[in-house]
Amino acid sequence: MSFNTISVIGLGYIGLPTAAMFASRKKKVIGVDVSQHAVDTINRGEIHIVEPELDMIVHAAVTENYLKATTVPEAADAFLIAVPTPFKNNGSEIPEPDLSYIQSAALAIAPVLKKGDLVILESTSPVGATEQMAEWLAEARADLTFPQQKGQESDIRIAHCPERVLPGHVVRELVENDRVIGGMTAKCSQAAIELYKTFVEGECVTTNARTAEMAKLTENSCRDVQIAFANELSVICDKLNIDVWELISLANRHPRINILQPGPGVGGHCIAVDPWFIVSKTPEEARIIHTARQVNDEKPDWVIRKVKLAIERFLQANPNRTIKEVTIACYGLAFKPDIDDLRESPALNITKMLRDYHAGSLLAVEPNIEVLPKSLTNIELVDLDVGLKTADIHVLLVDHKEFKETRVKSDYLIDTKGIW
């Protein structure tokens, strides 16, 4: 097949780097996003997210006319869907996946599909989502045939190819990492391999669509379980007056032990989310995965209890002060170090909870953003020096490089990452 024009639907943390990588290989790329701001920013040769090296690649691609962004899909030879897959706010203990973004993307590209096109779902999805997308496309385009109807001889090729990259290293890992290619037929997989080999240097490993969907969920659920062990261990050690970081360092000297580091919870658009896709499909069977999610989701509440105890100790030591005169600084809002991504961030949630509880001043120190999200009202964004000099109580939530380069000595320090 010949992929002269590639369309990427969704220009976020995965879609934009993917579009840029194709464009860097001199392919014509049409990026599509519902955000006019994102579209306008990209068309100026700039980026609306923080990702090392990406700004230079996007600028060159736009300047050389290989990449353009729009809000309305146009004809192409391959379509990659990289839109969010959140959960419905149904109040249930086990959240229900929301596939409406995938459905909207599928219906948006349906009018411009033509025989021979390839459609790839990159969005992390519950098992069966790729087949559901194929059904939506088939309903919208009865004049074309799809793999569930004609198998190998279908007009349209469909596959699921999950992204497997780490924020902050996306550009390099898109190229170097292996890709799981889950075509609905062998021809679908082969077409997807040909497309990704435009820039992927890692191995493209083929399977079926359902297994490809489950592979991504399994990777992140495994990490979630491992982090849950570390987080639970930190709570146990706190109760037993043991330094959990020293303990883990000692345990990891065993040649077959590799315990991860604890933190304030688990965040991001993958590890904190993907296990629920498995639990929602198989609630009776996914017992360890479900428990790990609960352990990690409860860690922010544990951090809040530690802060409340610090406030009590501070007021006991300073009887002339009231709680309204106590200043708290939260260091880090992103879900992981050295990025601006606040999605599913336990640090952000902890800061919000402190805002709702604390009557005094609350400072946020986040060197990777310039403006606080609208949800963080009554909180002041300050530089690191201001936080260190002003705050009475220090709450370290993310181990950004700026924080690692300093030292804080305080009787009122809650260090969830063990760096101070």
Image: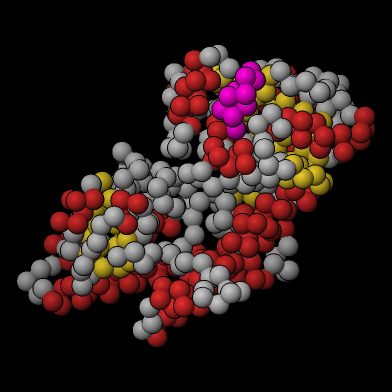
Q: Residue at x 56, y 70 (%)?
A: 258
Q: Residue at x 16, y 73 (%)?
A: 315
Compared with 28, 18 (above or below) is below
Give the x, y percent position of residue 256.
61, 74
In the picture, residue 390 is in which quadrant?
A: bottom left
Residue furthest bottom as drawn: 240
Q: Looking at the rendering, in which quadrant would you find the C terminus?
A: bottom left
**226 relative to 55 in the view: left or right:** right
Q: Residue at x 83, y 20 (%)?
A: 115
Give the x, y percent position of residue 331.
30, 55
Name the colouring of the figure. Answer: secondary structure
Q: Is residue 287 magenta?
A: no
Q: Is residue 20 magenta?
A: yes
Which stretch appears magenta? 18-28
- Is residue 328 visible to the viewer in this orientation of the structure? yes
**133 relative to 407 in the view: left or right:** right
Compared with 336, 117 (above or below) is above
Give the x, y percent position of residue 137.
77, 30
Q: Residue at x 73, y 30 (%)?
A: 195
- Is residue 378 visible to the viewer in this orientation of the structure? no
Compared with 60, 193 (above or below) is below
